[in-house]
Amino acid sequence: TIEVEEHSHAGMANAYEAGAAGLPCAVFRGYRGAGLASVNPNIKSITCPFTGEVLAAVPAIQPDVTFIHAQKADRKGNVLVEGIIGIQKEAVLAADR
């Protein structure tokens, strides 16, 4: 079965970054007023203990494997990625392989 979970690009980027850092979740300003929390129960609200601001929180993503798009690679595992890389770096650092 395939599971689908709705996120914005910023939500995914923050979740991968939290996974790469070994954190349990990501906290950020995104999703305010977006309505995604109504279709994704993993989007929670959290109150900042320092400012009282209500922020969004999503669980960290730590995939077993991450696939990336690269222009060149060799058999030794060296990879060349050029141009806009998006969140590939965070996805790679969060993954086991």
Image (tube, rainbow, N blue to C red):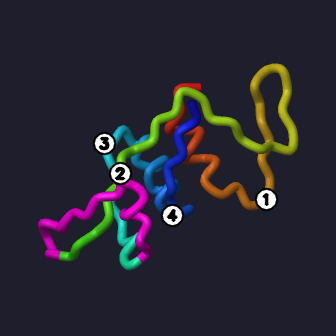
Q: Quadrant of residue 31?
A: bottom left
Query: Residue 47: percent from the left, percent from the top?
Result: 18, 67
Residue drawn 60% across and 29% down?
A: 65
Q: Earlier in the sequence, mark 2 or mark 3?
A: 3
Residue carrying label 3: 24
Secondary structure, mark 2, is loop
For residue 26, say whether it is visible: no
Residue carrying label 4: 10
Q: Is residue 3 above or below residue 96?
A: below
Q: Which residues are magenta?
A: 34-52
Secondary structure, mark 4, is helix
Query: Residue 48: percent from the left, percent from the top?
Result: 18, 67
Query: Residue 5: percent from the left, percent from the top?
Result: 50, 49
Q: Badge 4 local density, few (<14 within 10 Å), some, or many (20+)?
A: some
Q: Quadrant of residue 28?
A: bottom left
Predominant secondary structure, magenta span: loop
In the picture, the quarter occupied by the C terminus is top right
Q: Is residue 63 left or right of residue 44?
A: right
